Image (spheres, rainbow, N blue to C red):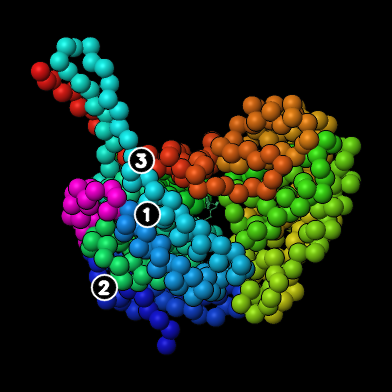
Amino acid sequence: MSTLYQNFIDGRFTPADPGTAIDVHNPATHALLARIPTATPGEVEEAIAAARRAQPAWERTPAIQRAAHLRAIAGKLRQHKERLAEIITREQGKILGLARVEVDFTADYMDYMAEWARRIEGEVLQSDRPGETIFLQRKPIGVTVGILPWNFPFFLIARKMAPALITGNTIVVKPSEETPINAFEFARLVAETDLPAGVFNLVGGRGADVGASLCSHPDVGLISFTGSVQTGSTIMQAAGRNLTRVNLELGGKAPAIVLASADLDLAAKAVVDSRVINTGQVCNCAERVYVERAVADEFTAKVRALMAATRYGDPMAEADLHMGPLVNQIGLDKVAAMVNRAREQGGEVILGGRKADRPSGYHYEPTLITGCNADMEIMRKEIFGPVLPIQVVDGLDEAIALSNDSDYGLTSSIFTRDINAAMKACRELRFGETYVNREHFEAMQGFHAGRRKSGIGGADGKHGLYEYTETHVVYMQHG
Ligand code: NAD
């Protein structure tokens, strides 16, 4: 019998109904790993009510004490690192090394947000009146909801929870139904600490019912969502009915610009690293390349060699892999269909281009497509797989124009040794992030935010933290 997890509401695990439980499978072997509960409408109601009851006392708790709770949880995560990493790998399919990085990063993120305890600041303003002082105070919003994707499922718990809690909010988290086990294990570790009941709650279930109920609840002050553009739009509509704030971290179609002035070895390695990490299932991954004509053949040959050397397989059974499987059959079929359409639209597949011939697992071959142009779907839609399309351009202006001509605006990169070209790109690229001469991957002290359909608001650093606060102005008359 596989484990049936339980929702974590008001500091307690609640009995789960096996009849509505959701099976979770390993994408490399298709083995059943565990079952998670579908929260009933009553449980969704109770989770939000518990978060609401707990919030005033949590807000009154000094921030430095709230920080101690975050650090205690970070300590638990480090203590159980290996077990948690294996759980993440089994249910999501990323290689074990990356899963370990994810657990470390999650614990570090909790500590990083805890460090803000003594740094959340307001302002004191001059008044136009005599005998008056104006104070701007940063206050928590109240009850927040965190809706998570499956690609970095463990880290995303902390990315929502840590800024919410350190600023005095409480939270109800719903993990993705694809990768929920790590979140239920996280809740078990939280339950071993003395975090007050109701401050952190976790409910399982599918997006269309449990997720939708959480996002349409009038007592929720902020919905922090990471996932697809389509779901982000649905959530925003639900939030609109109650005028609930939203923070939306959505998809990407990151361009990588490679100029003739680039260090081509560095560029090729950084682009390939950014494409194969997590089997290409990362919002900030390099999703399309614009290479300057003079170096196109040389760069493409270097990329091809690196992509061809990319080893993939079952990350729990094989060592020294670069990639595991894609997360599910839908993801695999989507990638395969996009590559087929790219062929039909004139792209030349010079490496890979097929589902991998393996007995099990949602594996797709590392794939390189040349001869791409701006009209092709593969240059415009998020692939979310180990497939790299390359378009040749005649200079920086063309590369910038093509990069900006996109529904998405999350991350971008440029490779050049020409400082003027780099500065021009940083000035003209309309993206939330630009990486110069390095792979795409954000830092926790930065600010991760998308333009256009890549989202609203952002996460990380001081600016991400303050998204979990609202400003209260006090006009104080005194002697
Ligand atoms: P998804 O939109 O399918 O699902 C995300 C979550 O939303 C899941 O928990 C799901 O159950 C829930 N959900 C679905 N419908 C809902 C509804 N109507 N109401 C409330 N919740 C609902 O996304 P996914 O496939 O899990 O994640 C992949 C996507 O996430 C990609 O597009 C990727 O680019 C994006 N992503 C973005 C970032 C970022 O920081 N910008 C980070 C990671 C992933």
Q: Nearer the viewer, residue 470 or 363?
A: 470
* Three-letter residue code for mark 3: Arg
Q: Seen in the image, is 428 located left or right of residue 443?
A: right
Which residue does the numbered mark 3 point to in the structure image?
A: 119
Q: Which segment did they paint magenta?
A: 46-66
Secondary structure of the residue carrying tag 3 is: loop
Query: Camera-side residue: 390 or 433?
Result: 433
Residue indicated by mark 2: 14
Residue 392's image quarter? Answer: top right
What residue appears at the point 42 percent right and 88 percent down from the top-left corner?
1
Q: Is residue 362 left or right of residue 18?
A: right
Residue 205, position in %: x, y? 38, 65
Q: Is residue 51 above or below residue 410?
A: below
- Tag nearer the camera, 2 or 1: 1
Q: Is residue 104 magenta?
A: no
Dot 3 or dot 2, earlier in sequence: 2
The amino acid beneath tag 2 is Thr
Give the class, few, some or many, for how many residues have Cα within 10 Å of label 1's Cα (few <14, many ≥20): many
